[in-house]
Image (tube, rainbow, N blue to C red):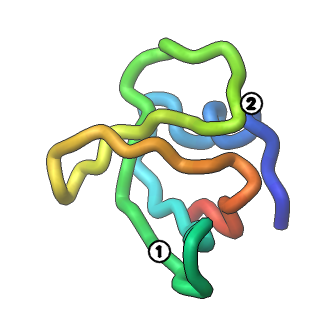
Amino acid sequence: MTYTFNEIKALLLKQKRTVTFKSLTSDKIHEVYCTVNRDMQSGSDKIIVWNIIEDCWNDIEVTSVTDIS
């Protein structure tokens, strides 16, 4: 499934979910348990998420997202 920036933001805003995405530099698939804890972006090729497990910010290319659960 492909997602838009706004769809990803709506699914993650103040909610904790696992985002699955494809690496931009290899064929690896990554998963990150994350949230968007405040509405700080209005649109972009990348979405900034708070990685709950590693306690840090990550940016994820919108077009690389394959699943959100």
Q: Residue at x 20, y 58 (%)?
A: 53
Residue 52, percent from left and from top: 24, 50
53 to 24, vertically: above or below = above
Residue found at the far bottom of this picture: 27
Kindly report the distance in space between the C-alpha atoms of the residues bearing marks 1 and 2. 21 Å
Q: Are marks 1 and 2 in contact (CB under 8 Å)?
A: no
Judge from the rendering whether residue 45 lies leftward or rightward of residue 39; answer left or right. Answer: right
Neighbourhood count class around disc 1 (C-alpha, 10 Å): few under 14, some 14–19, many 20 upward:
some
Residue 14, percent from left and from top: 43, 30
Q: Residue at x 61, y 41 (%)?
A: 11
Q: Residue at x 53, y 40 (%)?
A: 12
Q: Earlier in the sequence, mark 1 or mark 2?
A: 2
Neighbourhood count class around disc 2 (C-alpha, 10 Å): few under 14, some 14–19, many 20 upward:
some
Depth order, front residue of 50/58: 58
Residue 66, percent from left and from top: 70, 68
Q: Quadrant of residue 44?
A: top right
Residue 30, percent from left and from top: 47, 74
Which residue is under mark 2? 6
Q: Quadrant of residue 17?
A: bottom left
45 to 65, vertically: above or below = above
Depth order, front residue of 41/17: 41
Going by the numbered disc 1, the residue's amino acid type is: His
Judge from the rendering whether residue 51 lies leftward or rightward of residue 23; answer left or right. Answer: left
Tag nearer the camera, 1 or 2:
1
Which residue is under mark 1? 30
Going by the numbered disc 2, the residue's amino acid type is: Asn
| Element carrying mark 2 | helix
Q: Residue at x 42, y 18 (%)?
A: 38
| Element carrying mark 1 | strand
22 to 51, vertically: above or below = below
Residue found at the far front of this picture: 25
